[in-house]
Image: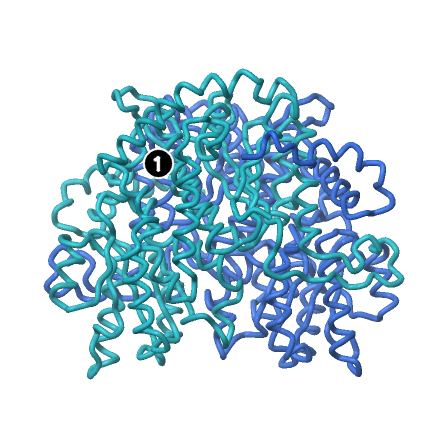
Chain colours: A blue, B cyan
Amino acid sequence: MTRQIQLYYKNVTAEAIGPAHGLGTDELPKLNGEIVRITEKMRQDRQDGKLPYRDLPYQDQTCRKINDLTSQLAGKYDNMVVLGIGGSALGNIALQTALNSPIYNLLTERGGPRLFVIDNVDPVQFGSLLEYLDGQLDRTLFNVISKSGRTAETAAAFLTVQEMLKARLPGGQLTDYIIATTDANSGTMREIVNREGFTSLEVPDGVGGRFSVLSDVGLFSAAMCGIDIEQLLAGARDMDQRVKTDRLTKNPAALFAAIQYCYYHKGKRLSVMMPYSYQLKDLCDWFRQIWAESLGKAHDLQGNLVNVGPTPIKALGATDQHSQVQLYREGPNDKVFTFLEVKLFDRDVTIGDAGEVTELAYLSKKKMGNLMNNEKRGTEYALVASQRPCLTIRLAQINAYTVGQFIYLMEVATSYMGELFGINTYDQPAVELGKEATFALMGHEDYRQLLGKIQPTVAIDEDYLV
Amino acid sequence: MTRQIQLYYKNVTAEAIGPAHGLGTDELPKLNGEIVRITEKMRQDRQDGKLPYRDLPYQDQTCRKINDLTSQLAGKYDNMVVLGIGGSALGNIALQTALNSPIYNLLTERGGPRLFVIDNVDPVQFGSLLEYLDGQLDRTLFNVISKSGRTAETAAAFLTVQEMLKARLPGGQLTDYIIATTDANSGTMREIVNREGFTSLEVPDGVGGRFSVLSDVGLFSAAMCGIDIEQLLAGARDMDQRVKTDRLTKNPAALFAAIQYCYYHKGKRLSVMMPYSYQLKDLCDWFRQIWAESLGKAHDLQGNLVNVGPTPIKALGATDQHSQVQLYREGPNDKVFTFLEVKLFDRDVTIGDAGEVTELAYLSKKKMGNLMNNEKRGTEYALVASQRPCLTIRLAQINAYTVGQFIYLMEVATSYMGELFGINTYDQPAVELGKEATFALMGHEDYRQLLGKIQPTVAIDEDYLV
């Protein structure tokens, strides 16, 4: 059994799903030249230091530093709370769900502290957690993650935690309970770190939040919870070797991107990722950010208005067969599907004997993992019968090595896709306006002039209230 | 403050977002006649017993029966496990997330047993839970929910639990640990219930799974966990009175459907629901089923091939501002947004003092609930600035009464939408083929002839494996 994850693409071909919706034998080869050009450009960009995320898996000192820190902290905490949002949370959540028990926080024997990731400013969610932690703050570590420290949601959570710790632990050192992951040199959070003397980790330079999971950002909480971060990086390095070739059909990142790109231009602008594994569901949520925020762009690099961007959709097999598959088969043929399939589950369950219930005899004593995989095959068959294009990413097993591969594969596929679209993959200009409006509405002095513009949109006009 | 939830639609009008993407003053009125016709048809259908889901909120005896059962069982269990999938799980999960603590299962003081909903056949997820429960099976209640008992996922879970209970509790009565919610009279699960003597509840006749949350299906686990199911139904009845009028602009269900319908035909086929409340996130997942499975249909009632269906997308504010809003603002203008907004949160948190950090002074001592709501307003402003249509459903508070309203509102809106499309809202014909293929792959005798057809799709062709 190979340790490498694999992309299977037969069921996007015209041969499999027919000429109306399948890719003809000439369609992918048309992109060969583009893939050669892009692969060379990315190689050059990387060499010029313009794609630092590509080198994260080779940062051995990161692993050592984090493992050393984790060893120092071992046994000191029952709870760890990550305060972050977007790229400072989605990777942390995804690694935890993929590589620890689904009921990790309920277990008495765990690989580390309970993990909570607060990636919102919901007062009920946050207030409930703070109440839960109130009696055990001396056994709780907070890891605030913010490149600048200015992100409103993370800053609000941080200020609240800091004040609570000061009030509850009057004799205690805050430095025992807060570790900040932030810019190495500058910014609001770095200033706080310097003043308060917090232990700190780094958000690497030139790596956007959505490409940062394999840095201190994602690795620290993972290591604290017992995840083998060296294997994560080893898996990513394995994938790196595979995505260097400029031969389209040998490079899974280029191929995934090329197929998605073809379908985008054939009117299938929705990209559904549907793992047949509970453990992989939050990796789809992580993918949802990297795909949407990198590729949803108004302008191309020449400044032309293009308004491109596939919409990523997360689904979950087999659950969503009973929720979304009716639409997926009979609704508009506007989606391309990517299944994630696990060959061997970490543990399996033998289904009970059906006894006298002959109707269920077909399940008796079968393995649940086998049922899960046959659900995937059954759904794929049904979608193919409706001429819907299906990709599969196959994992021999779920472990840090294969998850590292998956993350790196999707990161590089995103880069290919951005180059194919001719856009800037690494910025997010449209996020600013909403942030500024929130600053204004919260009374931030610097944004006061925005308030007048915002009012017509947010003031309630009773004529339209039903 | 009104106890009723409200729909706000100013920001879908041409006045608000411009004529290219907004609804002109004549567009909704064009549907007045259709809404009058459909409202009368639904009134008649209901009177003829063809829309039994509409009457669920009036089943006082359901409430009494469930509350009596819950009283009998009070204090006996530390854990409750729902075994169900699709409509037999999504409502249960949604009610729990909306109306109990986000960390309910971790609390020592709770309104009832811990709640686990197993709506999949993932062997790692299921196996981990069974291991966790192994030492406390005498304090665990299983509620298996399946209309027929033939659903492969639920049947597999049920058989496994049954066998485990028999092995582990040799002297115990299985009847103390299993309650089945199933068809009142017939089907595989009803036969099992009759033979084993399980206590049973009913999946009501003529009510599809996705419309069944306000029946025994959704109410029992809710009541067990301390949720006020009478208030749920009272809220639904309140909404029922409001959605009987045939005046479009007075009927929030008709209006929600009409706006979504207009936009579908204007090329905005994606419907994003984005609550600014952690508690409401799983109601969006419930909505995702009712919208997709009801409205995603290949044929209209005349048998014409139409392949219609909006794609529902769940998002979460403020979290997804840092994941999806870049795409939502700059990508294709192919989405209509529905925000859920909560005026008064059940609890609030005061943000800590920013002290010397002047950059964050605007947050000092503000309420986190206020920040959450301003995040929503800021995002709405930014989307409107990009000419993206935005609806808001406003809840004064989150409680059983308002959640009951929301559920009923979305159910009736789904019915209106189906009538506007001219399709059968209540069937799901496309789900069958995948189920049958799974049966075949699992070795079910009755489906053996399908295997030959399935093989070409599911057999791996190494030429397409990268």
Q: Secondary structure at mark 1?
A: helix
Task: Give the labeled residue for mark 1.
Answer: B294
Looking at the picture, does residue B74 appear above or below residue A88? below
Q: Position of residue B183 (x, y in %)?
A: 19, 53
Residue B37 vs residue B161, the one in the foreground: B37
Circle 1 crowding by C-alpha within 10 Å: few under 14, some 14–19, many from 20: many
Q: Amino acid at mark 1?
A: Ser
- Which corner quadrant holds the N terminus of chain A? bottom left
Residue A105 vs residue A244, the one in the foreground: A105
Q: Position of residue B290 (x, y in %)?
A: 38, 41
Image-quadrant location for residue B81? bottom left
Image-quadrant location for residue A192? bottom right
Query: What residue is drawn where x is 21% and y is 48%?
Result: B439
Position of B57 with respect to A251 (left or right) is: left
Q: How many marks overall?
A: 1
Image-quadrant location for residue B195? bottom left
Q: Position of residue B361 (x, y in %)?
A: 84, 55
Q: Is residue A427 visible?
A: no
Position of B52 with respect to A112 (left or right) is: left
Query: What residue is drawn where x is 25% and y is 66%?
Result: B179
Q: Position of residue B458 (x, y in %)?
A: 30, 42
Looking at the picture, does residue B447 appear above or below residue A259? below
Looking at the picture, does residue B266 appear above or below residue A168? above
Q: Is residue B296 visible?
A: yes
